[in-house]
Image (tube, helix red, strand yellow):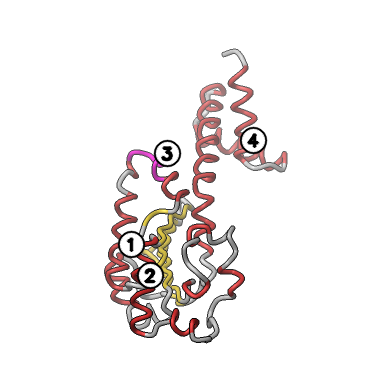
Amino acid sequence: MEPLPETDEALDEYLEDGDSDLREVLLDLGRRTVHIVPSCVGLSLGLVRENLTFTLVATSKEIAVIDAAQYLDGGPCVEVALGADLLDVDVRDLLDEDRWTAFALTSAAKGVRSTLSLPVERNGEVVGGINLYASDPAAFRGKHEELAGSLGASAQGAVANADLGFSTRALAVETPLVLADRRIVDVAVGRAAAREGVDTDTARDRLRDAATRAGISMAEAAEVLNNLYGTAPD
């Protein structure tokens, strides 16, 4: 599996040096998952504290291999080809280009048929989540414990088929914009703290309060502040 273009952008351009290994972590999660669930076509890693999502999707070659395997063993592709109905997903959702750009090479018969959501815990606190997507409706059956152990997640609290619409993909698409907005806010907070002689927490609180009073987002307020400080004399 490979990163969505937006995940690539976020990993390449926005993350700090300390997060440079996140790409390899993400790719390793994908490799481990496919080893256990060959029909996996998508994986999303969500970070709770950062409120960010990164997504991998199957490549065209991987999809072709999945197709071949399903035709050999009479999987869901064969069922649909023989006239069976899709059990879990509305075909119109699968053909919506806006939602399924990354799956342009797959057909309605090869859509997401099952999902598994696993929480990631550290010291008793949920710090993230791993969502897995497969083209086989029984892909994750009996594999919760094995997947959780391999991916560093928890099988306790695992939820099956909760995201057949692959909503985490949309969150991943927004990640570069979220990170860009945060950078704008951080720059404004730093400038405000320096100019007003306060610490960054105080400057951030003042920016948040100003945004709330104006009925705009913090990023919008920060952009105004950056433009102001960028043109005003020191």
Q: What secondary structure is marked by label 1?
A: helix
Check the picture and name the quadrant holding the N terminus. bottom left
Q: Amino acid at mark 3?
A: Glu
**What span is colored magenta in the figure?**
11-17
> Which mark lies nearer to you, 4 or 2?
2
For residue 13, the mark is 3
Which callout, 2 or 1, points at the residue further toward the start of the chain? 1
CA neighbours of label 3 inside 10 A, class few (<14), some (14 to 19), many (20+): few
Residue 14, horizontal then vertical, whole percent: 43, 40
Residue at x-position 54% and y-position 34%: 184
Q: Amino acid at mark 1?
A: Gly
Question: Which one is in front, 3 or 212?
Answer: 3
How many numbered discs, if any? 4
Is 76 included in the stretch rendered in magenta?
A: no
Provide the residue designation for mark 1.
30
Provide the residue designation for mark 4.
221
Q: Is residue 13 left or right of residue 29?
A: right
Examine the image and state in which quarter residue 177 appears: top right
From mark 4 to mark 2, how far is it between C-alphas? 42 Å
Residue 8, horizontal then vertical, whole percent: 41, 47
Residue at x-position 49% and y-position 54%: 172
